[in-house]
Image: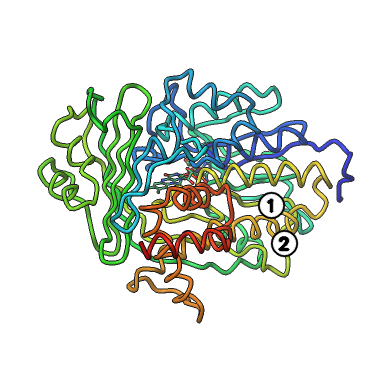
Amino acid sequence: MAMKSNAPLGHAVVAGGSVAGLLAARALSASFTHVTVVERDTLPAGAVPRRGVPQGRQVHALLTRGAVGLDGLFPGFTDAMTAAGVPSGDAQADFSWFLDGRRMAEAASGLRGFGISRPRMEEMIRERVRALPNVSLVDGTRVEGLIVDDGRVTGARVRRHTGAEEALPAELVVDAAGRGSRALSWLRAFGHPVPERTAVRTDVVYVTRHFAQEPGLLDGRLGTTVVPFPGQPRAGVVVRQEGGRIAVLLAGLLGEEPPTDHAGMIAFASTLAAPDAADVLRSATPVDEAVTMRYPESALHHFDRLDRHLGGFLVVGDALCSFNPIYGQGVTVAVMEAELLRSLLKEQGTRDLAPRFFAAAAALLAEPWSLAVGGDLRFPEVEGERGPQDAEINGYLDRFRAAAAVDPVLGTAFLEVANLMAPVGSLFDPELAERATRSVAR
Ligand SMILES: Cc1cc2nc3c(=O)[nH]c(=O)nc-3n(C[C@H](O)[C@H](O)[C@H](O)COP(=O)(O)OP(=O)(O)OC[C@H]3O[C@@H](n4cnc5c(N)ncnc54)[C@H](O)[C@@H]3O)c2cc1C
């Protein structure tokens, strides 16, 4: 039966206790009497990588929009990061950016960047969700499938680490199981239609290694990002992190694969536009081994296009849409989806929640997806639909990036978009267009 907007909602189950699942639980806790987060892994006590989140060993950027959203969901979050020793600074003045091989002009952008590791970020979110009185975290337990009655979800089937199976009755099940989500087979099991999927293959390979911070490295800056571009499918990030560490990420796409041995990493880093990664590799003391992770393709599931929704079932986070990690968007998008879920529940409860959520999530995802895919499609090797106006748009953005090396205002505008604080369309503002033309002509 459909809920009235002001009726108290009973129990919700979230499958997956990583960032998107925890944030969804935070959103649900405002409307449901109880929320159970079911996580397959046994959760660690501290900020350490774990099996179910292999990307946790790789460098993660937290975009400014994500940090702002975390403060909204958990007041004081960014202050707590600082108190926990997470370095932060201005995303433009304290970071060096290399776009298409040129260094962006420096300026204070007003955008805040953080050097936080993925495990620490998850742990900080988990601590806050654990503290919510109506949320339980059940770890070492896997969601096996849905329980459906009369065309809507009435619960989830779970398997404990002991092998015991159990039914968890719930009015809502949210799948936040990441890229390995079984949502489509869960739907098929009940003869439900499954959504179309758009994939963009870039074959990204990440290699991350951590080092002890030493004075003099990075000239006191927080970090450096070298963005890949057509003809140079290699990228690098160096960033100070909590715990007195510096993380070095080398990335390749479209067949480029960073090595993991010390000499090979230095050789790879030496081909990047900025010297910082090679400098750190040469002079700093490693504190762990280099770890590789492959990310073959980005994927967007079009649940919004389904004719028929399974009532009481939502999909969030990487299970719904996973982005080329180079753009650092996944966590921020999970934050935005949690904000959306919270406001949809507040407005109209669970009435038609699935179609309302998937339609609004598709609108929310359109911007970050087009930003990432637009960047990927600059590489002629990447397969995907290119529109008739793309060449003109890309030509303009090429000039814009080149001009950002001279005019810091353009760099700030670019970073506002990259940090999901402004829409891509803002880069086409006539005043910025004129500045871009003027700077390139110089
Ligand atoms: C190499 C790489 C680099 C990235 N870099 C960035 C970055 O710089 N910035 C950024 O914002 N994002 C980045 N991302 C994306 C980011 O890691 C994710 O968007 C973020 O972790 C949220 O993902 P999620 O919670 O949806 O899924 P995941 O983090 O993948 O977690 C899924 C969880 O579900 C659990 N699970 C799976 N199946 C079940 C089941 N049946 N029952 C119960 N539990 C289950 C898993 O154990 C896991 O805990 C990167 C991703 C990759 C791969």
Q: Are marks 1 and 2 in contact (CB under 8 Å)?
A: yes
Residue found at the very far left of the displayed protein:
263
Mark 1 closeness class: few <14, some 14–19, many ≥20 residues within 10 Å: many
- Which residue appears at 33% of the width and 30% of the height? 240
Q: Position of residue 286 (x, y in %)?
A: 19, 30
- In the rendered structure, find residue 309 and report the number of the disc placed on it: 2
Is 77 left, or right, of 261 in this rendering?
Answer: right
Counting from the top left corner in percent of width and height, residue 383 is at: 39, 74
Front residue of 93/377: it is 93
Q: Residues within 10 Å of mark 2 (few under 14, many from 20)?
A: many
Residue beneath disc 1? 313
Q: How many marks?
A: 2
Query: How far is mark 1 from mark 2, CA to CA?
Result: 8 Å
Residue 126 at x, y = what percent?
54, 28
Three-letter code, disc 2: His
Between residues 103 and 242, which one lies in front from this camera angle? 103
Q: Judging from the image, what secondary structure is the residue with disc 1 in?
A: strand
User: Where is residue 247 shown, x and y percent of the image?
Assistant: 30, 35
| Image side of residue 373 versus residue 206, left or right | right
- Residue for point 83% across, 51% down: 351
At mark 2, the secondary structure is loop
Q: Is residue 292 left or right of 99 when viewed as pictured? A: left
Which quadrant of the figure contains the C terminus? bottom left
The image quarter in which residue 58 lies: top left
Vertical comparison of 223 with 227: above or below:
above
